[in-house]
Each structure stands twice: as structure tokens, then as C-alpha cells.
Image: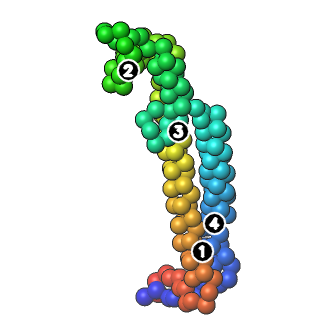
Amino acid sequence: MAGIRKMDVFEKKDFIKALGTAELIKSIHEREDELQELLKERISFRSESADYLTGKSSDCAAVKQVEAELSMSAPMNENGKKMGVDEKKIWLATQEKSNPALAEAIKKQKMAAFSSDDLDTRIEMAQTRLGNLKAILALRTAQITFFAGDVLVTINEGQE
């Protein structure tokens, strides 16, 4: 039958150290720094790309500007009159491929949307990693509290 004894203070200290809480806290700080850098990157990106990021409408400001300029120079319709709204929409749709300025603005709009989504995904992933590390820290804190307390912690000393 095994003998049972209490862990002494030094054994508890060694056990608590083995939990690696210092390394965990260092990892949390690193993830916080990573998240902060990503948030700064998103702010900078949105500032630099403001003209190409879409709002609640389907096109960004730069695309709308090129389309407005093109609309002003739209040709007359078959009857020699100014094009109607629907005719202009159809004509502008053809300009997406034939007008380099509009094609470039649409390309930049798509790239800005992709980059923005990528940044948002990276931020979300960093927040998740940080949350997971904080949950592990909460568990380690509970473990340390348990083992550092006056709880009877025993060690089997072998068989008699």
C-alpha cells in the first residue's frame, strides 16, 4: 500500500513553476502587440484606400467619380437625344471594359475590398488567439490558487 504525504512548499513552488505561467504571459503580451499592429495597419490602410473602399452602396467614390465623368460625355441615343437613365446604365456597363480609367478604378476597388477583408480576418484570428491565451491564463490562475492554498495535496511515496 502506498504512503501518502503532503507536498512541501518547495514541491508546490516547483509544480507551479512547471505550469509555465511566465511564458504564457509573455505570449499574451506578444499577441496583444500583434493585435495592436494589425489594428494600426487597418486604420492606415483605410485612410490610404478611402477612395476605393465601398460604403453602403455598390461602388466606391473613385468608381462613382469616373462613372459621373463618363456620364457627362455619354453619346446621344439613336434618336439624337440624351440617353435616359437605363440607357446610360447599359452604356456605362460597356465602358467597364473599354475605358481604362474606369477599369483601373474597378480593379483598385476590388483589391481594396480584398485587402480590407484580409485584414479583418487577420484581426479576428489574432483576437481569437489572444482570447484563448487569456482563457488558459485563467485556468493556470485557478490551478496556482488551488496548489498554493491550504488544500491537502498528496504524493504517493511508493508501495510498502
Q: CA distance from mark 3 to mark 1?
A: 37 Å
Q: Hey, which quadrant is residue 136 in on the image?
A: bottom right
Q: Residues within 10 Å of mark 3 (few under 14, many from 20)?
A: some
How many angstroms separate mark 3 from mark 2 (CA)? 31 Å
Type of amino acid under label 4: Thr
Q: Amino acid at mark 1?
A: Thr
Q: Disc number at residue 88?
A: 2
Type of amino acid under label 3 = Ser
Could you say which quadrant of the image residue 85 lies in? top left
Dot 4 alpha-carbon crowd within 10 angstroms: few under 14, some 14 to 19, many 20 or more: some
Disc 2 versus disc 1: nearer the observer: 2
Residue type marked 2: Lys
The residue carrying mark 3 is 116
**Residue sitting at x 46%, y 19%:** 71
Closer to the camera in the image, 132 or 100: 100
Q: Nearer the observer, disc 3 or disc 1?
A: 3
Q: Which mark is residue 21?
A: 4
